[in-house]
Image (cartoon, rainbow, N blue to C red):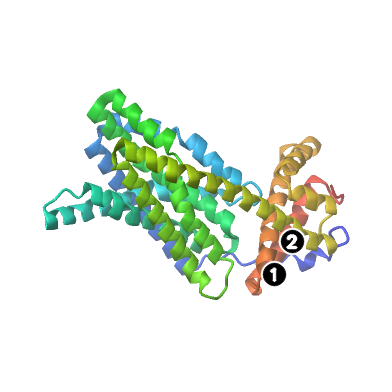
């Protein structure tokens, strides 16, 4: 019977939690596929009608440029306890396809109703009142879907920031295709460049910052198994997201002076606060990993040097390079899986310490321990780092 260094026999950890997809999960996947398909048709139709193919493709190219900054920024936050790639892709796709299509239909329909009822131009009202509620709700719904699909691995504020940032980044991408394409049709290259500077250079993090408020609220809620904060935090986060979005749009419709004032007084301070929150959240996650994995080190599952490595991004990178040096890509892949499983284990243990314990959680703990031991055997055999 194999054993981790000084730890309990692996037969105690080998139980893999059941992974059968329930009928409800199958229905959810089916609905997602249908929803993405319908929303894709809506977007393609909107691009074809409002911009045309040529301007739409040009808008797509320019809309993709800010993603080179926005997406890596949120993946940087996610370095210690990486989320499954499929869920990160789903988050971005939800924002780019579903949330954008829903917002397009809801915003257009609502403003048409307002115009018919009042006989006035509802553009400013729609930008300040309608759009923030509709868009933050559409993006927030994506976070709830991800939470439902990924409940055991949605661990708190960091995950809320990462998923919210990618949903909002996808939304900004989808929305920018339309704005940039229209600008090109209306004012040629000058209009395209001006719109790109405004949306892609000056404010690429606007949508992510708004939606991250909802993500933080959901992240706080997952730590609470009971009590009013579990229900209140997501609602407060969403309300703050809507308020910030409304204030930003108000500055945009108030002319150049109003926009510059809003940018200096709103966007810059909140961007600084967002950066500070991201740095704090990642450091906090590193502390949690160190503290919780130390418990397993005391029980013999991990060596102290492994705990130190797993609590540091540079040390993790060095460990992957070391693993590749002794065993090639296969060994490096095993080290990657070892690090991911250890991070998941640390966050799981943290939830257990807060009272989130049931048979499923205990089975997942055993599964993660077994995964770590299996991966270790692939890159180092029976030796510790």
For residue 362, above or below residue 173: below
Q: CA distance from mark 1 to mark 2?
A: 9 Å
Judged left or right of residue 317, residue 127 is: left
Q: Quadrant of the N terminus?
A: bottom right
Judged left or right of residue 221, residue 93 is: left
Judged left or right of residue 365, residue 57 is: left
For residue 322, above or below residue 349: above
Identify the mark at residue 385; answer none if there is no mark: none
Depth order, front residue of 255/241: 255
- Residue 182 appears at what percent x and percent y? 26, 34
Circles 1 and 2 in contact, beta carbons < 8 Å: yes
- Residue 275 appears at what percent x and percent y? 56, 45
- Residue 351 appears at what percent x and percent y? 65, 67
Q: Quickly name the residue at label 2.
A: 292
Q: Quickly name the residue at label 1.
A: 353
Judged left or right of residue 276, residue 307 is: right
> In the structure shown, which secondary structural element does the residue marked by tag 1 occupy?
helix
- Identify the residue at horizontal 87%, vertical 49% (top origin): 383
- Residue 364 appears at what percent x and percent y? 66, 65
- Identify the residue at horizontal 64%, vertical 74% (top origin): 358
- Counting other residues with Cα less than 10 Å from the Cα at mark 1, is it few (<14), some (14-19), or many (20 or more)? few
For residue 226, above or below residue 367: below
- Identify the residue at horizontal 44%, vertical 51% (top origin): 210
Could one spot residue 150 in this view of the protein?
Answer: no
- Snapshot quadrant of residue 236: bottom left
Q: Mark 1 or mark 2, which has the lower sequence index?
A: 2
> In the structure shown, which secondary structural element does the residue marked by tag 2 occupy?
helix
């Amino acid at each position: 019977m194999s054993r981790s260094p000084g730890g309990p026999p692996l037969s105690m950890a080998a139980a893999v939690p059941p992974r059968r997809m329930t009928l409800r999960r199958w229905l959810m996947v089916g609905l997602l596929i249908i929803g993405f398909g319908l929303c894709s048709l809506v977007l393609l139709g909107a691009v074809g009608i409002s911009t045309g193919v040529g301007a739409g493709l040009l808008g797509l190219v320019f809309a993709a440029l800010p993603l080179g900054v926005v997406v890596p920024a949120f993946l940087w936050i996610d370095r210690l306890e990486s989320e499954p790639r499929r869920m990160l892709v789903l988050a971005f796709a939800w924002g780019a396809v579903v949330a954008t299509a829903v917002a397009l239909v809801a915003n257009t329909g609502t403003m048409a109703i307002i115009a018919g009822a009042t006989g006035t131009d509802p553009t400013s009202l729609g930008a300040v009142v309608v759009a923030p509620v509709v868009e933050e709700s559409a993006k927030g719904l994506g976070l709830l879907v991800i939470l439902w699909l990924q409940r055991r691995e949605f661990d708190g504020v960091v995950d809320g920031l990462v998923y919210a940032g990618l949903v909002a980044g996808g939304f900004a991408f989808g929305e920018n295709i339309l704005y940039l394409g229209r600008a090109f049709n209306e004012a040629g290259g000058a209009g395209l460049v001006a719109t790109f500077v405004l949306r892609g250079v000056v404010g690429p993090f606007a949508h992510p910052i708004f939606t991250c408020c909802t993500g933080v609220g959901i992240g706080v809620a997952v730590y609470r198994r009971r009590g009013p904060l579990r229900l209140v935090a997501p609602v407060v986060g969403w309300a703050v997201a809507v308020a910030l979005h409304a204030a930003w749009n108000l500055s945009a419709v108030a002319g150049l002076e109003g926009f510059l004032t809003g940018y200096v007084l709103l966007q810059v301070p909140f961007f600084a606060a967002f950066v500070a929150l991201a740095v704090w959240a990642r450091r906090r996650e590193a502390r949690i990993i160190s503290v919780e994995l130390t418990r397993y080190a005391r029980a013999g599952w991990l060596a102290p040097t492994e705990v130190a490595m797993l609590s540091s991004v540079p040390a993790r990178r060095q460990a992957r390079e070391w693993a590749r040096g002794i065993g090639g890509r296969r060994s490096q892949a095993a080290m990657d899986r070892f690090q991911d499983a250890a991070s998941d284990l640390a966050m799981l243990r943290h939830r257990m310490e807060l009272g989130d314990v049931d048979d499923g959680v205990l089975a997942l703990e055993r599964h993660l321990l077994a995964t770590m031991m299996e991966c270790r055997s692939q890159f180092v055999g029976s030796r510790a780092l």
